[in-house]
Amino acid sequence: MIKRHLSLLRLPIKWIWIMCFTIIIISCNNENKEHDSSLVFRYNEHKNIGSLDPAFSKDLADIWATNQLFNGLVEMDDKLNVQPAIAKSWTISDDALTYTFTLRNDVTYHKHRLFGSDSTRIVTSNDFFYSFNRLKDKKLASPGSWVLNKVKTFYPVNDSIFEIKLKQPFPAFLGLLTMKYCSVVPKEIVEHYGNDFRSNPIGTGPFQFKRWEENLKLVFRKNPDYFEVDKNGKQLPYLEAIAITFLPDKQSEFLQFAQGNIDYVSGLDASYKDEILTADGKLRDLYDSDVNMIRGPYLNTEYLAFYMESDAPEIQSELIRQAVNYGFDRNKMMIYLRNGIGIPANAGFIPKGLPGYSNKIGFTYQPEKSKQLVQQYIKETGNNNPEISITTTSNYLSFCEYIQRELQKTGLIVNVDVVPASSLKDAKANGKLDMFRASWVADYPDAENYLSLYYSKNFAPNGPNYTHFSSEQFDTWYEQAFIETESKKRELLYSRMDSLIMSHTPIVPMFYDEVVRFTRKNVKGLGINPINLLELKHVKKTN
């Protein structure tokens, strides 16, 4: 067990959380009597879980849970390669419009009395036909309906062949199909439970639903009939169960991890980052013998954005926009404000870890050049007091204040305005902010998802182009990428588009986020991936 640091004992925990956690511990002890506790993976979900219906798996908390219960046609591996799941193979037509999937014939649903005497049945292409139609159903109002926007038709050719036709070529389509929205669900179970399917899920995944005490505890048990095996032919999963608690506070969550009550903590919260990590991102000696830290690129770019149709002359000036990009040390910012977790964004908008990323574009820290650009602006315009305002939320105030201090050394006056997240979201969508902090987490693992923010037909509020950046050359390349089926050529187009964006400076990339995970030493096989998906079917625990 991890030695408890004395400072942890002084962490403020509300009495109601203590009482709730006492109940949870008693419940866990009872649960562990049924099977070896070393085969139970325990984690806390501080954001809670809204639904176990994959059609509503919008938030990471829901995605992590439904990923244990459901499968789709395909899945993503840790290197963002699309792999077979229920579909054992597929073909794509020469015109890149028709996708034909051949299904496995050994995938069954979790057992349920509604399946009749056998308590289960094999998944067929008709199940995907039902599941996709359900996703499109306006009455259901699934937040994932957009995934099928580029789909013209889909239909079962026979029990084992499922075909999808697109309206236009879309190379990222297979990546979209890996999203949990596209999971297969059984019609008879869904229609029996209706809206209550959210808390009575039946899928095909490595774990099956056992019980859910909302806001308290969620338990999954091993699916003994799961279809996947490891490289040695051993059936997955290795674990007997997953137990999820719901302490609503990251500080309390970390305390439970430190005390050995949970096996895993994800992310780096300000409440404990200095407790567990040194300034350069290493585990402190207190935890090094009992904790593993794994980290890797996360498909999330944190950045500042300029509204390119602003009336402010400073925002319209490429000199000022370049000066901001050159004017602060991203490496230093990551050390002091993130304990070294995160990758300084000295390249373009496409984050590290995604095809299309190039470290040959972007801006490095050049304070003298930044000063020269500001002075050139002053000389050309006669404006001796150039001024910009950055709008942000309180969570990122420290970053913006750091940038403010650095830029003011160049002669540029910088104001920082703090607003609620909802206000920032509305204002940036409606062109009411000259400059604002933003982030973009990939909906699907393809650089097109990032570059869509600069396509002129995607101007906000009707699309994600919040900067209102516009370039005919960019639009040409963007549209060309849709019909380019050769991955290397498409990757080159992505890099060209990213380079063009940075040459016009509608944004200031700050850093590319990293996935960071802390586990106990007895947890093996967890792994890490750039979409921060929690994959537990390969996880083992030792005594």
Image: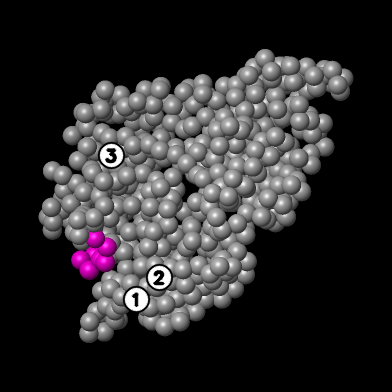
The residue that label 1 is drawn on is 123
The residue that label 3 is drawn on is 519
Q: For the point 44% across and 45% down, which residue is it?
A: 530
Could you classify mark 2 by the number of other residues whose Cα lies within 10 Å: few (under 14), some (14-19), or many (20 or more)?
A: many
The percent position of residue 80, horizontal first and vertical second, equals 43, 50
Left or right of 513? Residue 71 is left
Q: For the point 60% across and 24% down, which residue is it?
A: 364
Count of numbered circles in the view: 3
The percent position of residue 495, horizontal first and vertical second, equals 60, 42
Q: For the point 55% across and 25% down, which residue is it?
A: 330
Above or below 203: residue 277: above
Do the residues bearing badges 1 and 2 touch, measured as CB atoms within 8 Å? yes
Determine the secondary structure under disc 3.
Answer: strand
> Of marks 3 and 1, which one's residue comes earlier in the chain?
1
Q: Amino acid at mark 1?
A: Val
Q: Amino acid at mark 2?
A: Val
Mark 2 vs mark 3, CA separation in Å: 31 Å
Determine the secondary structure under disc 1.
Answer: loop
- Identify which residue, 59 or 464, lies in the foreground: 464
The residue that label 2 is drawn on is 184
